[in-house]
Image (spheres, rainbow, N blue to C red):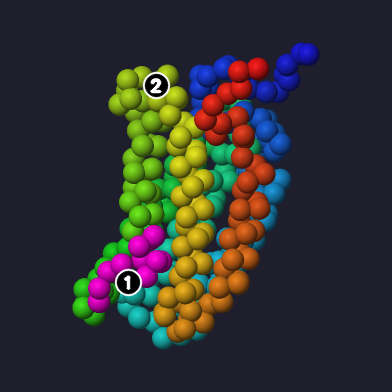
Amino acid sequence: MPSDPHAAPQSGTEHEPLLGRPGDVSQGRTDPILKNLITGTAPLAQAGGLILTALVFGGVFTHKLLIPFSLHPLLNAFAVLVGIQAVLIPQPTHTAAQKRIGARVHAAFWATALMAFVGALSAVEVHKKRAGLGHFESWHAILGVAIYALLVLQAAVGATMYFFPAVYGGVDNAKSLYKYHRITGYTILSLLLVNVVLATRTYYGGTILGIKTWATVLGAVLVVAGVTPRIKKQKVRLWTSSS
């Protein structure tokens, strides 16, 4: 069967630019990169992200602001929303040019999200120090620290793989790690959504702000429903069939 003339060159290995071959949803050759944020099932993810952001911002701004602590949920919610954009933007790319642009916009989104996450962590640390509060007193706090650490590691590995492949011994070696970067990225997004839900089980999130657990679960489910169908299965497969 003749190959698709619109498809990117394929090979049996990772010998192609980061972030995917054509799948169920592909970016048109003349489509702007930002259109990837609304193609296919992406509107479901956008709706879920906006619901989560609205719940947090609405809860915080309808109650007394606690500076700097209020910055913790606000910056975290903003960062999660930006992180969703970072995941959505490269998924439909498939030509070499699209992948290059997608990778750079993806990196810019995650850099923005990471700065917000750092600000959120700093805010809660300053608050705890001032108030003499302990650490790791909830599952939300425990998972949050683990996620922050994963985010820093993921950002460092992703940036060096794509922009400085010599760190890994060359382009081919770096490309062989792309699938693990993708899998870790989807895992981190899932953990972030879980931690938003867990925040409603804390005294501040659930009792003071009154954010309902079911509402955050709904938002998280929509994000997953929007992101999952757009995943390029061949790009996260850890092994290939022998047939």
Q: Which residue is mark 2?
A: 173
Q: Position of residue 205 (x, y in %)?
A: 45, 77
Q: Which residue is mark 1?
A: 137
Query: Is 134 contained in the magenta span?
Result: yes
Is residue 88 depicted above or below 239 in this figure? below
Would you identify the image quadrant in which residue 230 lies?
top right
Is residue 185 depicted above or below 7 in this figure? below
Q: Position of residue 143 (x, y in %)?
A: 39, 60
Under mark 1, the amino acid is Glu
Q: Circle 1: is it few (<14), some (14-19), or many (20+) Cα within 10 Å?
A: few
Q: Residue furthest front?
A: 242
Residue 61 located left or right of residue 146:
right
Q: Kindly state the secondary structure of the residue where label 1 is placed.
A: loop
Under mark 2, the amino acid is Asn
The residue sitting at 58% across, 16% down in the picture is 11
Quarter of the image with the N terminus in it: top right
Would you identify the image quadrant in which residue 221 lies?
bottom right
Q: Position of residue 142 (x, y in %)?
A: 35, 62
Q: Position of residue 233 (x, y in %)?
A: 62, 34
Q: Which residues are magenta?
A: 133-144
Mark 2 or 1: in front is: 1
* Viewer can see residue 93: yes
Q: Kindly state the secondary structure of the residue where label 2 is placed.
A: helix
Query: Is 114 contained in the magenta span?
Result: no
Residue 95 located left or right of residue 155:
right
The residue sitting at 46% across, 42% down in the picture is 184
The residue sitting at 34% across, 75% down in the picture is 69
Q: How far, Cα to Cα, is label 2 from label 1?
A: 41 Å
